Image (tube, grey):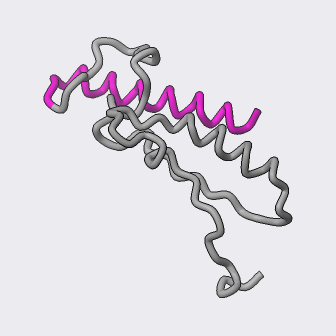
Amino acid sequence: MDAEWVRVSEQIGAAASHKGIAVIDDMLLVEQMSKSISQKRGEHVIVLHEKYAHFNYASRYPAACFKFKPGCKYLHCDFEAMINSYNNSIAYTDYILYSLLE
């Protein structure tokens, strides 16, 4: 397949589903990818762009996923809380990737 024949026919993204909500939950991508696959429209490529471990880390995962504490709740926090928030975002990304592969 030549690149000139490839076009975007569908864009899957969590951000559009979260207008007005502080946490952008990449877990929505799992459900949306499953729907896309189940439609069986022939050969297609799915590209998922997660937000996961980009600053502001604490806004990338739900509060229920605070494993490393104390975490950063606001933009300004100490170094330990920042590292913990980053680690939480990585742990949540791991969970999402596991869910995609199930």
The picture places residue 85, in percent across and down from the top left corner, at: 33, 26
Residue plotted at (35% across, 34% down): 21
Residue 25: x and y in percent read 47, 34
Left or right, 76 with respect to 32, comes to left
Q: Which residues are magenta?
A: 76-102
Q: Please provide percent x and percent y for residue 41.
A: 82, 62
- Indicate the quadrant containing the C terminus: top left, top right, bottom left or bottom right: top right
Q: Nearer the viewer, residue 6 or 91?
A: 6
Q: Is residue 74 above or below residue 41?
A: above
Q: Is residue 72 left or right of residue 100?
A: left
Residue 99 magenta-highlighted: yes
- Please say whether residue 96 is one of the residues in the magenta stretch: yes
Foreground: 74 or 35? 35
Q: Is residue 81 left or right of residue 3?
A: left
Q: Residue at x 58, y 53 (%)?
A: 12
The part of the image, by quadrant, that contains residue 78 is top left
What residue is rendered at 38% in x and 15% in y?
A: 68
- Counting from the top left corner in percent of width and height, residue 53 is at 40, 39
Q: Is residue 27 left or right of residue 39?
A: left
Q: Residue at x 30, y 41 (%)?
A: 55
Main secondary-structure element of the magenta-colored stretch: helix
